[in-house]
Image (cartoon, rainbow, N blue to C red):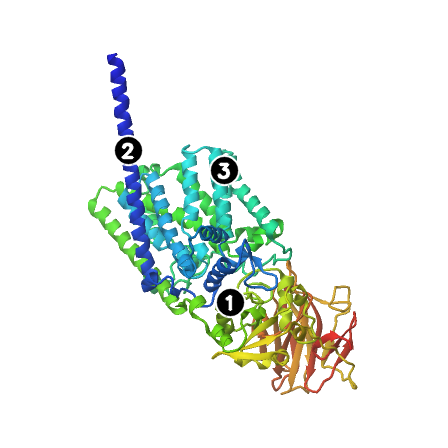
Amino acid sequence: MLKIKLILSSCAINIETLNTSIIKDWQQGILTLFSYVLIALALSYLFMRDILFNLNSVQLDRSGDGFKNYFAFAYQYNHGEGLWFEGMQYPYGDLLSFADGQPIIYQLFSLLKSIGIDITGHELFVVQSLPILGIILGGFILHRIMRLYDQSNLWSFVVVTACLGLSPQIFRFNSHFALAYMFCFPLVWYMLIKSEREKISKVVLVVVLSALLLIYGFIHPYHLLICAVFLLAYFGVKLLVKKFDWHIALSAIIPIILFLIITNAQDIYDDRTMNPWGSWLYKTEAPDFLPFYGWFSRIFDNILPLRTDYTEGYVYLGILVFVVPSLFTSTFAKKDIVIEKLSKELYLFISASVLVLMFAMGIHLYLTDNKINDWIPTLKHFRSLGRFSWPFYYIAFISLAIYFNNILKATNSKYIKWGLLSFVLIFWFLDVYKYTAFFNRKIEHYKAPNELYQNTRLLDALKTSNLTEDNFQGIIPLPISTEGAEKFNPKDNWFVKTEVIPFSFQTGIPFVGAYMSRTSLSRILKQYQLSCSPYIQKEALEDCSSEKDFLIVVHKDEEKQFEDILNRAYFISETEENKLYGISIDSLSETKTIAVPDSISQPIYYDNFDNENQGMLSNGSLSANGETIIQDIKADSLDNINLMFSIWYRIDPDKSNVPLFSIRCLDVDGNIVQKDDYNDKSTFRFEVIGNWVQIKKELRIAKNTSTIRWIVNAEHLSLDHALVTSENDLFYKELGNDFAMMNHIIGKKE
């Protein structure tokens, strides 16, 4: 009986001790979390200043990605449903994820709305404050990781604060809000550590990470792929040490497959751009390892090739990247205790992060001569390779801090120890302050009032007429923007964009064209046809389900450019910069035909490249791959004469790229006396037939010109109907399918 009492008494003591331990852990966790609330607010104030207290009245970006991403979320919340976004690219729309509308976040707030929790009027606060919540969660998770590696509470707070304050994701706060969530990768890393220490089973890890990464994919697809690539890199590193951790590979592959299945089931487009521009530009490069601001920039600006601004591949690790190697190679190389205290597990994580860093630097493109994008087509959509450096940033920063702390512990001299610590803390403070101040100057330049609610200029102008939003099915901004379509980006108008977006949100009327959204090439070209000349058939009108009129918004300085369209429209009202017109479907769909002229003259140059290649209403085309001479034209009698150059080129979703054209006037010795480069971004208006677009250029030929060399620089590009005429020429040619060409116009024959 006595033994039983002793056992029960011992159990009671153990339970009481266990409960006390659990309570202490919870208290410590809550205190840590609250500390990172304060740290997140302090850091946010450093790079936002007073905007931090006005997150629903001041937006951090007035016209770029940030404004569009805010619009996509707010429009969908107020006017849309599901994962298909119809706010722009009317009459087709697009997946919400391609418009950076944070689908899973939208779905969450839609669910809350259905039970009476409505954020209408506070959408800007939501999209701009959620990344701050991400700082809190990211800090808490990184702190837990530091503690798992036996770092003190105080040192963990200091290190994590510096890590967050120098994070490359800070520069996503005013543009790609979804990419600013700092907790995404650290949480995956934390789960891996717990799994390695057998705190969670392999099956649980696969389930949890698969679900987590799938959720990430519907916040922003980059989070999914960044984490998945790291998991695959870690799986590869484990293979090198002869461990086949199948659960890690599955944790990467399963969410990718599920994401593709779900996305493809909803996606009606099969001709999205497969080789978006920028893969070679937005990668991590050597200057990205160094700061572009502060003390380092001032000292070494004239010595090293430093950046002057943030880039996608930025991955500066702070002062420890200079201090730790110096200490290791000089004073502490023989201190075995310093090395032994570093976990082998951490070495494996560092190795995996270096592999992902190499991916961010485009090593896979170099090694395969870019063929890997053909082998794994999904990779083509992720052009901003520099973002894949984020796992390296977090792992390397934390690892350097752990290693530095071990060095301090192995240092016998208090003076050296406190001297080194003070040196690092001072430079961390300087770097964080200068880095956040640089970002603050940037957002001070781009900030604006809450445009979706406060910019009512078009709405007020419409109210002065006897018309309402119910009279219109869509908005046609002139010029129509195809920004983000990658391969076709004609020049648009900033004033039109910044008034059309709020007006669309306020009225629920979708607009034609895209602002910063990759989409179906065939659909975006059909939309663009609505701004083409009356000789071009408007195919998109056949896909409209409404008979209502369209509302046209055009900048006053560009009315002349679109006079042929506006002559068929009716004036409604105007703002300081823009004018509003209405146009019926019947008027917009009117198509002119080409009559045979009474007299025809020979052009200065014409070629339809009659060969075996597929042409546009012809039997051939010119194939350009690299710098290609379209034609050398003798110009002995063309001095000081205005010439019109036009050519059609085909846009393919997979191989072709954006061409750069150049007209070079050469003298008798071959010296350039005049040069004019142009591409789609320098041109307001195009003609579009199918997937062929025509680009025009007017140029007055310089004196002493002997030869006009017309050049295109492109990859896998097909061109057709190259034409050069003077002011007095009248060129006419019949083409296939009852089409004809008269001067620089192609249309149906009369």
Task: State the image coordinates of residue 13 (x, y, percent, origin top left).
Answer: 25, 25
* Residue corresponding to mark 3: 206
Badge 2 amino acid: Ser
Which of the 4 image quarters holds residue 530?
A: bottom right
SS assignment at label 3: helix
Give whichever of 573, 62 is nearer the camera: 573
* Residue corresponding to mark 1: 507
Of the two numbered discs 1 and 3 in the rendering, the one whose residue sits closer to the viewer? 1
> Which residue is pictured at 34% across the width and 55% down the height?
165
Give whichever of 575, 318 is nearer the camera: 575
> Which residue is pictured at 79% across the width and 69% down the height?
737
Badge 1 amino acid: Thr
Cα–Cα gap, marks 2 and 3: 30 Å
Badge 3 amino acid: Val
Quadrant that contains the N terminus: top left
Q: Is residue 387 visible?
A: yes
Q: Is residue 90 left or right of residue 334?
A: right
Cα–Cα gap, marks 1 and 2: 57 Å
Nearer the N terminus, badge 1 or badge 2? 2
Tell me: residue 283, above or below residue 350.
below
* Residue corresponding to mark 2: 21
> Alpha-carbon neighbours of circle 1 within 10 Å: few (<14), some, or many (≥20)?
some
Quadrant that contains the C terminus: bottom right
Nearer the N terminus, badge 1 or badge 3? 3
Of the two numbered discs 1 and 2 in the rendering, the one whose residue sits closer to the viewer? 1
Of the two numbered discs 2 and 3 in the rendering, the one whose residue sits closer to the viewer? 2
> Which residue is pictured at 31% across the width and 41% down the height?
29
Q: Is residue 30 left or right of residue 738?
A: left
SS assignment at label 2: helix
Circles 1 and 3, Cβ within 8 Å, touching? The answer is: no
Task: State the image coordinates of residue 608 (x, y, percent, origin top left).
Answer: 74, 72
Task: State the image coordinates of residue 372 (x, y, percent, origin top left).
Answer: 59, 50
